[in-house]
Amino acid sequence: MYDSPARVSAAGSPLALTTITEAVLPGIVEPDGIQVRTRPARPADPGQVVLAMEAAGISFAEQQMRRGKYYDQPPYPFVPGYDVVGRAVDVGEGVPGSVLGRRFAVLTKTGAWASHVTVEVNDLVEVPESVDSADAETFVVNGITAWQMLHRLAKVRPGDTVLVMGANGGVGSTLVQLASIAGATVMGTASPKHHDAVRALGATPVDYRNPDLHEQLRALAPKGYDAVFDHVGGEGILNSYLLLAPKGTLVSYGTASTRDVQGSSKAPVLKLFARLMLWNAAPNGKGAHFYNIWAGRRRRDTFRAKLHADLTQVFALLADGSLTPQVAARIPLADVAKAVQMAESGTVVGKVVLVP
């Protein structure tokens, strides 16, 4: 539709996009080793859209990628960034011009830590104009993850009792809110300094460092939990499984306990997979699953349709005030090292967001 990097914006004014700024992971480095570079801008190819980034998140996945520990990360160097919210400034052939100037969210997996991000038009999910971009960003990967684990895997219903490990984190805080909206009673683990925040989101907080944690959690739900959401993994996953009600569901979605462990990035995940498969095959009525946001992507149309439907519902809850965004900090892309350090510090509630 356009054939040069100098585009026309939705308002009709020239958009002289000549360079793009991006944060690059050159290898396994400390946060201050992440490089901020510029490169020439390229026009959108057919079926593509260029978004001017308004917000991009720092999630646990990128923290793993920095350590070379994410299960299927690309080879270095590459631009991280699991999700982005941005405004369309360029469209390729076959993309309606009406897309220009509108604001969208996209699940990218990599590439979002940049001033401009090129995406496929079919991956766009429109963001309500009444919603702040950083607020919306906190619910892209986190919202899809929480919604699908809660409603597509665990199928939580009103009256259920739910346990969220890491209730102060990005996904955890979203799970707490969505479970409460669904009518569940929610318990959430967090350090004491985050208990007031977790309580405000709708959960009963429990100190995850308590040596009697398992007994305390059992006392809060003597009949067991209908759903347990565990991002910690490691040997502690057994306790999560033992806390289930007779027909409860365990959903594992990470291996945070092995984040700093040296060695293979795949071994802890494969061990976890094997354990969950054995539990899930046991004839005791309990379910045990590993959530992978990319599962089913080979059936691309179905995958996109589910993602679009789920994120649209999350954005509707955000727009009507049912969901409270947890933005830990808004930090410029140029200060990405500071942003990553903060995200990895364990001292924040919610999500650290990069802004232009």
Image: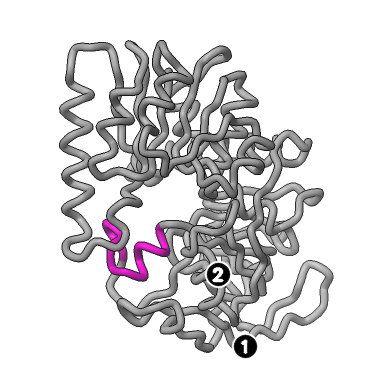
Q: Which residue is more in the foreground, 144 or 128?
A: 144
Which residue is the site of mark 1? 18
Tell me the element at label 1.
loop
Question: Residue 296's image quarter?
Answer: top left
Q: Which residue is more in the foreground, 15 or 127?
A: 127
Please give left or right for residue 209 compared with residue 279 in the image: right
**For residue 49, above or below residue 168:** below
Q: Which residue is more in the foreground, 277 or 189?
A: 189
Type of amino acid at the residue the image marks with label 2: Val
Which residue is the site of mark 2? 117
- Residue 313 x, y percent position in the rendering: 63, 34
Residue at 38 percent across and 38 percent down: it is 230
| Part of the protein shown in magenta | 61-73
Q: Which quadrant of the rendered structure holds the N terminus? A: bottom right
Residue at 50 percent across and 35 percent down: it is 206
Q: Which residue is more in the foreground, 311 or 162?
A: 162
Task: Decide if residue 283 is in sight here.
Answer: yes
The verdict on residue 16 being magenta is: no
- Residue 109 x, y percent position in the rendering: 43, 59
Type of amino acid at the residue the image marks with label 1: Thr
Residue at 78 percent across and 36 percent down: it is 320
Gap in angstroms between the C-alphas marked 2 and 1: 14 Å
